[in-house]
Amino acid sequence: MDWPAYEPAADGAHEMLALVEAEVGSLVELLPVAVLVTSGDGAVLRANASAAALLGRPDGLVGQHIDHILERRNLSVRVKTLSHKADAVRLYVLGDVPRELGKGEWTMPI
């Protein structure tokens, strides 16, 4: 499937990313778990090193669409949406699917 080329995020997405950065600072980079931050429409705005390693994408994830990144992968995915006015960003926490999903775990079918 061909995915549309990434276009720079609108000012609202940049404002939201700034708010996320203010809330969590550079913790995303330091976390030992794979984390992607996307715009409301699914464009990856930030990806930590753990996400690049888990997804085998050291060439970069920023600018890719989340559906394109996750398609045909069997991963556990937790999503938290942060909203401000009409804008939103999503935090995706990714992991290998455990043999038995524990309480509170869920997978996102892709």
Image (cartoon, rainbow, N blue to C red):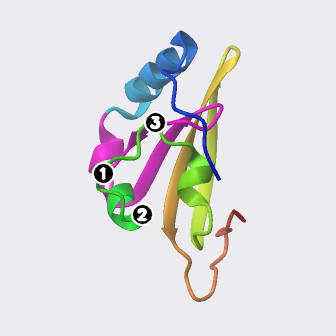
Q: Nearer the viewer, residue 59 or 66?
A: 59
Which class describes the residues within 10 Å of circle 1: few (<14), some (14-19), or many (20+)?
Answer: few
Percent position (x, y) of residue 96? Answer: 50, 74
Outermost front residue: 2
Instruction: Identify the image quadrant of residue 53.
Output: bottom left
Identify residue for label 2: 55
Percent position (x, y) of residue 6? Answer: 51, 31
Magenta span:
26-50
Q: Amino acid at mark 3?
A: Gly
Instruction: Identify the image quadrant of residue 109.
Output: bottom right
Q: Amino acid at mark 1?
A: Asp
How far apart in space, not on screen, are marks 2 and 3 (Cα)? 15 Å
Percent position (x, y) of residue 44? Answer: 49, 39
Judged by depth in the image, the label closer to the viewer, 2 or 1, is: 1
Residue located 29% across and 45% down the image? 29
How far apart in space, not on screen, are marks 2 and 1 (Cα)? 11 Å
Identify residue for label 1: 59
Is residue 93 positioned above or below 16 on the image? below
